[in-house]
Image (cartoon, rainbow, N blue to C red):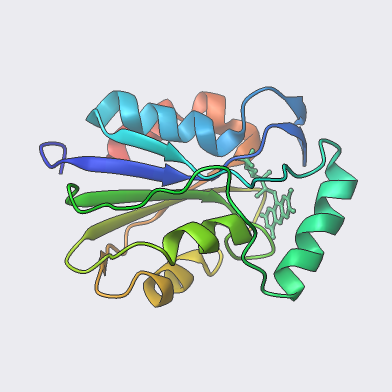
Amino acid sequence: MKDKKSIIIYFSRADENYAVGYIEKGNTEVIAEYIRDLTGADMFKVERKEPYAKDYQTCIEEAQVEQNNNERPELLHTLESIDEYEVIYIGSPVWWGILPQPMVTQLEKLNFEGKTVRVFTTHEGSGLGSIPSQIKRICKGANVLEDGLAIRGSTVNNSKNRVEDWV
Ligand SMILES: Cc1cc2nc3c(=O)[nH]c(=O)nc-3n(C[C@H](O)[C@H](O)[C@H](O)COP(=O)(O)O)c2cc1C
C-alpha cells in the first residue's frame, strides 16, 4: 500500500472542541499528518468557505442545522480530480455518527471508480460511526477497505504507534 500513489482527503476543525478545549490543530489533522509522514501521501484539507464558529456550542448549532437540512456547504478550495492516485485515505471527525457536510460536498465531486479507499476517523465515543457505509454510498465504484481506523480525539498525540500499525 505504501508504494502506491496516494492522497489523504480530510476535514478537521481547530478551535474549541469536545473534551480537549481550544486546540490549534484539529485532531484529525494530527492523524492525517502521521499518515503522510509514514506514506509520503499528498494531502488535501477540505475547508468550508465560511468557517464554523470557534466556540464549540455555536459550532454544534451550525453543524446541526446543516446536517438536518442535508446541505452541501461551499468550500474554500475544491479538489477537482483524483485520477493520478490509486489509494485514497479519507479522514474525518465523526459528527453525529456521520461526515461533516463539507466532506460530502467534496467527495460527491470526485470519480472514485477503481480506487482503493481507506477510512480513518477521530471521535469521542462513536468510533467509525456510519462513516464507512456513508463513504461506500458516496464514493461509487471504490473498493472501501473494511479495516477503518478510529482514534479518540483526546488521545491523538499518543496514537502514532496505532497509526503506524494500521498503515
Ligand atoms: C459538531 C460536532 C459533532 C460531534 N459529534 C460527535 C459524535 O456524534 N460522536 C463522537 O464520538 N464525537 C462527536 N464529536 C467529537 C469529534 O468527533 C471529536 O472531537 C473529533 O476528534 C474532532 O476532530 P477534529 O478536531 O479533527 O475536528 C462531535 C464534535 C462536533 C464539533
The quarter of the picture where the N terminus appears is: top left
Residue 167 visible here: yes
Residue 45 vs 83, above or below: the answer is above
Instruction: Give the image location of residue 9, x and y in percent.
Output: 41, 46
Count of numbered badges drawn on the protein: 0
Tell me the residue at 29%/58% (across/down).
117
Classify residue 51 by image quadrant: top right
Residue 92 vs 147, above or below: the answer is above
Instruction: Give the image location of residue 112, x and y in percent.
Output: 27, 65
Tell me the residue at 36%/42% (across/down).
8
Q: Nearer the viewer, residue 75 or 1?
A: 75
Tell me the residue at 53%/56% (across/down).
103
Instruction: Give the image location of residue 68, x and y in percent.
Output: 75, 74
Q: Nearer the viewer, residue 37 or 158?
A: 37
Which residue is farthest left?
A: 3
Q: Nearer the viewer, residue 93 or 68?
A: 68
Instruction: Give the image location of residue 90, x and y in percent.
Output: 40, 51
| Residue 15 located left or right of residue 75 | right
Tell me the residue at 46%/34% (across/down).
31
The quarter of the picture where the C terminus appears is: top left
Residue 128 visible here: no
| Residue 134 located left or right of residue 47 | left
